Amino acid sequence: MSLFKRGGLKRGGASPQEPQGPVPVDVPVRDEMIRLGQFLKLANLIETGAEAKEVCPAGLVKVNGEVDVRRGRQLHHGDVVELRGMAARVAEDTFGAPDGLPW
């Protein structure tokens, strides 16, 4: 008897009830790119910039679901960063002035 017949597995992949990781919070970023270490601080995933020097090389940070040890990695709009059960998404700053003008 297969697992499908006994109800052990469902066809079509994981069930919607299974957790897929933390729900990311959108963090607006002015520029089109931000470095991972800077974003960790901006998103309040770490308290100090120096802490990025510890958590990145230790393999504690995931970017788009994959561990990344590069503190200087470039992030772009839509990238999701996870650390210690929290997640933040790089979002476009819609509250800033159009065309990047400061006024």
Image (cartoon, helix red, strand yellow):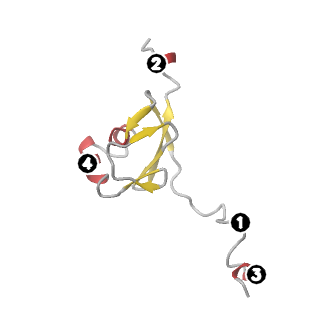
Label 1 to label 4: alpha-carbon separation: 41 Å
In x, y percent, where is residue 1?
A: 73, 88
Label 2 to label 4: alpha-carbon separation: 30 Å
Which amino acid, mark 2?
Answer: Gly
Q: Secondary structure at mark 1?
A: loop
Q: Which residue is mark 2?
A: 100
- Neighbor class of circle 1 (other Cα within 10 Å; few <14, some 14-19, many 20+) is few
Up the image or down, 85 lies above or below 97; here it is below
Label 4 to label 3: alpha-carbon separation: 50 Å
Which numbered tag is attached to residue 53? 4
Q: Which residue is mark 3?
A: 5
- Neighbor class of circle 4 (other Cα within 10 Å; few <14, some 14-19, many 20+) is some
Label 1 to label 2: alpha-carbon separation: 45 Å
Find residue 29 and report its image quarter.
top left
Question: In front: 76, or 80?
Answer: 76
Residue contact at pointers 1 and 3, CB within 8 angstroms: no
Q: Residue furthest bottom?
A: 1
Residue contact at pointers 1 and 4, CB within 8 angstroms: no
Q: Tally the numbered discs.
A: 4
Mark found first going from the N terminus, 1 or 4: 1
- Neighbor class of circle 2 (other Cα within 10 Å; few <14, some 14-19, many 20+) is few
Which amino acid, mark 4?
Answer: Lys
Residue contact at pointers 4 and 3, CB within 8 angstroms: no
Label 1 to label 3: alpha-carbon separation: 14 Å
Mark found first going from the N terminus, 2 or 4: 4
Question: In front: 71, or 44?
Answer: 71
Q: Which residue is mark 1?
A: 12
Q: Is residue 43 left or right of residue 57?
A: right
Residue at the image position 30 percent from the left and 58 percent from the top: 58
Mark found first going from the N terminus, 4 or 3: 3
